[in-house]
Image: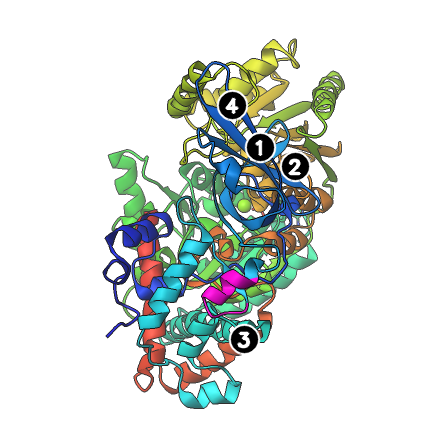
C-alpha cells in the first residue's frame, strides 16, 4: 500500500528522496502531495521578469534573445552568456566553462529557466541557471504538460538543484502508485458544501485539465485547512469555558474608583469603551479572553491598570507579563507612578485601600526574589509584574484573578495556557492580551481565534504627524546625500535623529567578510563578470550599526555628535547612551531595533532606517513611532536598494503611504506570500496553512468557524468523527513542533 505516510526515498530512490528532503523538507508522500504548485502555466505564456524578487529561487518561462561566448583574460576559460526575455525585460544567464551551451541556447527558443535571482550592475541575473528547452515554438509548455497528461503545467516552489520540472516529475511518479486516502470530512458535510473528495482534490491540484479543476481542488484543500484550525480553536474555547473564572465585580468604593478620580488626563473614547467591556467581562464567571490592539502610544497601560484594579477590589491578584526584563521594570515603575500612594500598602503615607505592585524578574538577587515570591504567595501584592519567569518558575499566587500579557506577538498560545494553569485546578483566571501590532480580522479569527478582540484606534491628543518617504538608493543615489543634508539641517534647528540598522556588526559577520576577500583574490580582473557565486550564498549581509556609525562620522555626518546603541552593550553603557541622547548631548543615535520599544525622546524628529527592506512592515511602523512624539512633526526615511516594481518595494511604499496601523496590516497581508502570514503573527501554525489566504478567504474561515463550533458543541472530543479528530491532532502537532523549535 502506498499511503500518505509512505517515505519518498523508497518510491523515488535514495538520491531523489534526499534532495527533496534537504531542499524542501519533503519526506513522505503526503508532504510531496501537499507541496502545491505556486501557479500554472498555459500554452504560449511567458513569465513577467519585472516582478522577480532579488534572492528568490524563481522559475521563468522565457525566450532566448541572444547568446554570446567570450574567453576570460586571466583565467583560461569561456563565458557563455544567454539573455532571456519575456518580451519586455531581459534576464542574463551566465555559464562558466560550458562552451557547449552556446549550441543549445539558440535565439528564439523557449524554455523554462530556474535559478536564484541576483543583480549585477543593474542587470538581473539567474545564478547557476538550470533550464529545460521546449522542442519548438509551436509545442512549448503544452508539450511538456502533455508528458504529464495535463493541460496546464504546474509551476512548483523550487530550490537550487530541484527545479520545478523535476518536482513535477516526482509528483507524477508518486501519483501513479498512490493508493489514495480516506476522506476525513463526514460525507454529510462534504455533500452539503459541494466539495470534492480529498483524493480527487489532491490529484487535480497537481494535474488539472483546466482552471475549473484547479479552483475545485483549491476550494476543498482550503476548506480542510480552515476547518482544522477552527476545530482546534473551538475545542480550546470549549475547554476554557469549562472552568469557571473568579468573579470580580465592580465596586464604587475601591481603589479603581480612587484611581479614576485622580487620573491626570481624560480617557479617550476608545479607552472608555474598552474599559466598559472589560469591566463587564471581569464581573462574570466566564473567563475573559480579550485581545486589545492599539497603536504604540494609544494608552493600553491605563486600560490594563484599571482592569487590574477592579480585580484587586475583588480581593484578588493580577499578574502582568512583559516580553523583556527592561519592559517589565518599566511597567512596574510606571504603574507605581500612576498609582502614587494607592500602591503604597503597608508603607508610611499609603492610601486607605492601597495595594502593592511587585516586580518579579530573573535578575533579582536571592533576597529580593524571596521577598517578591512571598508577596505574591501571601496576596500582599495586588499586582505582580514580570517576564515569563513568572510562568517558568514556581511562582504561586494567593488568588490570581487576571493575567495581562503585554505585546502578545512575543508570546505563544502554549505560554498563555501555562500561565492560565497558574490559577489553580478549579478556576481559570481572566486573560487580557495587549498588542501594538494591528491584526486584520481574519488573522484575529484564525491565529487568535480563542480571543475576543477590541481595537483602540485613536491616540491621545497632542501627537504630531509623521511623514515617511522611501529613499531608493539603487535608482536615485543622490537622494541619500539629500537625506544626510536634511539631518544636518534638523540638528541645526536643535532636533535629534535616529539612524536604525538591521545588524550590530563586527564579530557576528566574520564569515561574510571572509567570503568577500576570497572573491576578490580570484576575481579575474576584467571586471565584467561577477565570479560565480556559491549556491548557498544569500544577499549581502544587511548594514551594521558599527560600520554605519563609523562611515557617517568620517563622512556625511562629520561634525555632529554621534552615539551608538545596540543589544551587545553592557547595561550601564546602554543606560548612559540613552541618558545622553535624552539630555540632548548627542545629535544622532545609530542603533539597532533596541529602540523599538519603550524609548521616548520627544526632541527626536527624524529617523533614517537603513536597509529598510530587511524589516517587517509592522516593525517599521513601530520604529517610526519613536519620532514625532513632541510638538515638531516627524520624518521617517526608508533607505533601500530594492528596485521599483518588486513586492519588497511595494511593502515599503505601503509603509510610506499611511500611518494607520490597521490599514497597513491589511496592505501587508495583501503583499505577503501566503504562508508567511501566520509565521509573522507568531502563531506557531505556519506549516499548516498553504492554500488558505487569510485575506481573500474570509468567507471560508467564517463558515469553517461556524461548522467547527457546531461539531465541538455536539461532541467536544470529536469521538464520533475520527477524521476530524485527526485533523486537529495534526494542527496541534505542528504547533508543538514549532513551539519546541522556538524555545
Ligand atoms: P501603549 O499603548 O503604547 O502601551 P502607553 O500606555 O504607554 O501606550 O501610553 C503612552 C502615554 O500616553 C503614557 O505616557 C500615558 O500616560 C499617556 N496616556 C494614556 N492615556 C492617555 C490619555 N487618555 N490622555 C493623555 N495621555 C494618555
Ligand atoms: Mg505599552
Nearest to viewer (mark 2 / mark 1): 1
Which of 384 and 147 lies nearest the eye of the viewer? 147
Residue 82 in the image: above or below residue 51: above
In the rendered view, does 180 fall on the left or right side of 481? left
Cβ–Cβ under 8 Å for marks 2 and 4:
no
Mark nearer the N terminus (3 vs 2): 3
Identify the element where label 2 is drawn. Answer: loop
For the N terminus, the image quarter is bottom left
Checking the image for residue 643, the label placed there is: 2
- The answer to if 143 sits in the magenta stretch is yes
Magenta part mainly helix, strand or loop?
A: helix
Q: CA distance from mark 4 to mark 1?
A: 25 Å
Which of 656 and 369 lies nearest the eye of the viewer? 656
Cβ–Cβ under 8 Å for marks 2 and 1:
yes
Checking the image for residue 119, the label placed there is: 1
Q: Is residue 623 visible?
A: yes
The residue located at (45%, 84%) in the rendering is 710
Mark nearer the N terminus (1 vs 3): 1
Identify the element where label 3 is drawn. Answer: helix
In the rendered view, does 457 fall on the left or right side of 676? right
Circle 3 residue: 213
Q: How many marks?
A: 4
Indicate which quadrant contains ligand 2: top right
Amino acid at each position: 500500500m502506498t499511503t500518505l505516510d509512505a517515505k519518498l526515498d523508497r518510491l523515488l530512490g535514495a538520491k531523489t528522496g534526499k534532495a527533496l528532503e534537504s531542499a524542501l523538507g519533503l519526506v513522505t508522500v503526503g508532504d510531496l502531495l501537499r507541496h502545491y504548485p505556486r501557479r500554472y502555466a498555459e500554452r504560449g505564456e511567458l513569465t513577467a521578469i519585472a516582478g522577480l524578487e532579488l534572492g528568490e529561487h524563481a522559475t521563468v518561462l522565457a525566450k532566448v534573445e541572444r547568446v554570446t561566448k567570450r574567453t576570460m583574460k586571466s583565467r583560461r576559460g569561456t563565458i557563455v552568456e544567454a539573455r532571456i526575455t519575456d518580451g519586455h525585460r531581459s534576464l542574463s544567464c551566465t555559464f562558466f566553462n560550458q562552451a557547449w551551451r552556446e549550441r543549445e541556447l539558440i535565439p528564439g527558443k523557449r524554455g523554462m529557466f530556474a535559478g536564484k535571482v541576483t543583480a549585477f550592475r543593474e542587470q538581473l541575473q539567474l545564478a547557476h541557471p538550470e533550464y529545460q528547452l521546449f522542442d519548438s515554438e509551436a509545442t512549448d509548455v503544452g508539450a511538456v504538460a502533455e508528458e504529464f497528461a495535463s493541460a496546464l503545467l504546474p509551476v512548483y516552489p523550487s530550490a537550487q538543484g530541484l527545479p520545478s520540472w523535476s518536482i513535477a516529475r516526482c509528483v507524477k511518479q508518486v501519483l501513479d502508485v498512490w493508493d489514495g486516502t480516506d476522506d476525513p470530512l463526514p460525507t454529510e458535510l462534504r455533500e452539503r458544501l459541494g466539495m470534492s473528495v480529498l483524493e480527487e482534490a489532491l490529484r487535480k491540484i497537481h494535474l488539472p485539465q483546466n482552471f475549473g479543476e484547479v479552483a475545485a481542488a483549491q476550494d476543498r484543500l482550503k476548506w480542510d485547512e480552515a476547518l482544522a484550525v477552527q476545530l482546534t480553536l473551538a475545542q480550546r474555547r470549549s475547554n476554557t469555558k469549562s472552568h469557571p473564572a473568579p468573579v470580580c465585580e465592580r465596586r464604587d468604593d475601591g481603589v479603581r474608583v480612587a484611581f479614576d478620580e485622580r487620573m491626570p488626563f481624560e480617557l479617550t473614547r476608545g479607552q472608555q469603551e474598552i474599559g466598559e467591556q472589560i469591566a463587564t467581562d471581569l464581573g462574570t464567571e466566564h473567563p475573559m479572553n480579550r485581545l486589545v490592539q492599539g497603536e504604540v502610544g494609544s494608552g493600553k497601560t491605563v486600560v490594563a491598570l484599571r482592569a487590574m484594579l477592579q480585580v484587586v477590589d475583588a480581593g484578588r491578584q493580577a499578574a502582568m507579563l512583559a516580553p523583556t526584563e527592561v519592559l517589565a521594570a518599566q511597567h512596574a515603575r510606571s504603574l507605581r507612578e500612576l498609582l502614587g500612594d494607592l500602591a503604597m500598602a503597608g508603607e508610611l503615607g499609603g492610601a486607605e485601600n492601597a495595594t502593592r505592585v511587585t516586580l518579579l524578574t530573573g535578575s533579582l538577587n536571592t533576597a529580593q526574589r524571596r521577598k517578591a515570591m512571598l508577596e505574591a504567595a501571601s496576596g500582599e501584592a495586588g499586582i505582580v509584574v514580570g517576564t515569563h519567569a513568572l510562568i517558568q518558575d514556581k511562582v504561586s499566587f494567593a488568588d490570581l484573578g487576571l493575567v495581562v500579557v503585554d505585546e502578545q506577538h512575543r508570546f505563544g498560545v502554549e505560554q498563555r495556557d501555562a500561565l492560565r494553569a497558574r490559577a489553580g485546578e478549579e478556576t481559570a483566571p481572566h486573560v487580557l492580551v495587549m498588542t501594538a501590532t494591528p491584526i486584520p480580522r481574519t488573522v484575529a479569527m484564525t491565529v487568535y481565534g480563542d480571543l475576543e478582540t477590541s481595537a483602540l484606534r485613536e491616540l491621545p491628543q497632542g501627537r504630531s504627524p509623521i511623514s515617511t518617504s522611501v529613499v531608493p538608493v539603487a535608482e536615485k543615489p543622490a537622494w541619500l546625500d539629500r537625506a544626510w543634508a536634511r539631518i544636518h539641517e534638523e540638528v541645526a534647528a536643535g532636533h535629534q535623529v535616529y539612524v536604525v540598522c538591521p545588524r550590530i556588526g563586527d564579530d557576528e559577520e566574520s564569515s561574510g567578510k571572509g567570503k568577500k576577500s576570497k572573491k576578490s583574490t580570484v576575481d579575474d580582473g576584467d571586471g565584467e563578470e561577477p565570479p560565480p557565486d556559491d549556491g548557498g550564498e544569500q544577499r549581502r549581509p544587511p548594514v551594521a550599526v558599527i560600520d554605519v556609525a563609523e562611515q557617517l562620522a568620517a563622512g556625511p555626518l562629520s561634525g555632529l555628535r554621534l552615539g551608538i546603541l545596540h543589544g551587545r552593550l553592557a547595561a550601564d553603557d546602554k543606560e548612559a547612551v540613552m541618558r545622553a541622547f535624552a539630555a540632548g548631548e548627542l545629535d544622532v543615535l545609530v542603533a539597532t531595533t533596541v529602540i523599538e520599544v519603550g524609548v521616548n525622546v520627544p526632541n527626536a524628529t527624524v529617523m533614517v532606517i537603513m536597509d529598510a527592506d530587511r524589516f517587517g512592515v509592522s516593525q517599521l511602523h513601530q520604529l517610526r513611532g519613536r519620532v514625532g512624539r513632541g510638538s515638531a512633526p516627524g520624518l521617517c526615511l526608508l533607505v533601500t536598494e530594492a528596485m521599483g516594481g518588486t513586492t519588497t518595494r511595494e511593502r515599503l511604499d505601503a509603509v510610506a503611504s499611511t500611518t494607520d496601523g490597521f490599514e497597513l496590516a491589511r496592505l501587508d497581508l495583501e503583499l505577503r506570500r501566503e504562508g508567511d502570514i501566520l509565521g509573522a503573527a507568531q502563531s506557531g501554525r505556519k506549516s499548516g496553512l498553504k492554500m488558505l489566504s487569510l485575506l481573500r478567504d474570509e468567507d471560508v474561515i467564517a463558515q469553517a468557524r461556524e461548522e467547527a463550533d457546531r461539531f465541538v458543541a455536539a461532541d467536544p472530543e470529536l469521538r464520533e468523527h475520527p477524521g476530524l479528530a485527526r485533523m486537529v491532532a495534526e494542527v496541534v502537532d505542528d504547533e508543538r513542533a514549532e513551539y519546541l523549535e522556538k524555545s
